[in-house]
Amino acid sequence: MKRSSRPPVLEPRPSPRRRALSEEERELWDTVARQVKPLRKHRAAKAHAAPPAGPSPVVQVARPSPSARPVAAAPAPRVAKPSVPPLAPLGKRERAKLSRGRSEIEARLDLHGMTQMRAHRALTGFLHRAHHDGLTFVLVITGKGRSGGESGVLRRQVPEWLSLPEFRAFVVGFETAHIGHGGEGALYVRIRRARG
């Protein structure tokens, strides 16, 4: 008996029944649908006008009614970053009180001989503690540098560091100290009061 070379005839399979989504699946779908954003701006209008052609590559889902169609969520409003408070000079009266000893210098930090990295770390920790402890005026000693007319690295760097936004939460302002407290090799620093 000869076998026929014809391929066997396949009968079409019945299409699988689509089931309704559970409440948990519906919430998941809504969450995902809200996060969908169009790839390009000029296609955004077309995406809202007509649903995408073809079946979903991931999951086949019963189509919701037109009123329940998920819409891409609007972008979240940008929250304005809190502005960094500006530095304020100490003022003649406060500076005079400090230089004459009428206002107390509540803490001192001596950065002599430190590397920039170590000095920056020491200054950060010192200002955090002063702020936390509710101090008002502190003295930061940088040193004057070499005597050959070249100013020291820390003498130049520390005022720049104190001007950075990372220190504004702790520092109201700073100025060169009186000669009795180190002159150009030291700084009076006014500490910002802790809130609460």
Image (tube, rainbow, N blue to C red):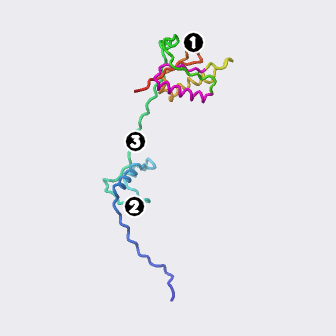
Verify CB contact (< 8 Å) between mark 2 and mark 3: no
Question: Residues under labels 2 and 1: Cα distance?
Answer: 82 Å
Horizontal arrangement in the rendering, residue 131 relative to residue 18 (left or right): right
Check contact, mark 1 vs mark 3: CB within 8 A: no
Residue 84 x/y as whole percent: 46, 28
Residue at the image point whose x is 59% and y is 25% from the top: 157
Picture quadrant of residue 26: bottom left
Looking at numbered disc 1 in the image, what kind of residue is underneath it? Answer: Gly
Query: Which amino acid does the dot numbered 2 rest on?
Result: Gln
**Residue 180 image position (x, y, % from top left):** 57, 12
Extreme right residue here? 148
Question: Where is residue 146 drawn, in percent x and y?
Answer: 67, 19
Residue 60: give its label.
Answer: 2
Q: Secondary structure at mark 3?
A: loop
Count of labels in the image: 3
Disc 3 target residue: 76
Please state which of residues 80 and 109 is positioned toward the viewer in this rendering.
109
56 magenta-colored: no
**Spot occupied by residue 65 in the image (x, y as percentages of width and height):** 31, 56
Residue designated by label 1: 180
Direction top: furthest residue: 100
Q: Residue at x 43, y 59 (%)?
A: 58
Q: Say what secondary structure mark 2 lies in.
A: loop
What segment carries the magenta color?
115-142
Q: Nearer the viewer, mark 1 or mark 3?
A: 1
Q: Nearer the viewer, mark 2 or mark 1?
A: 1
For disc 3, the neighbor class at 10 Å (few under 14, some 14 to 19, many from 20) is: few
Q: Which badge, 2 or 1, comes first in the chain's sequence?
A: 2
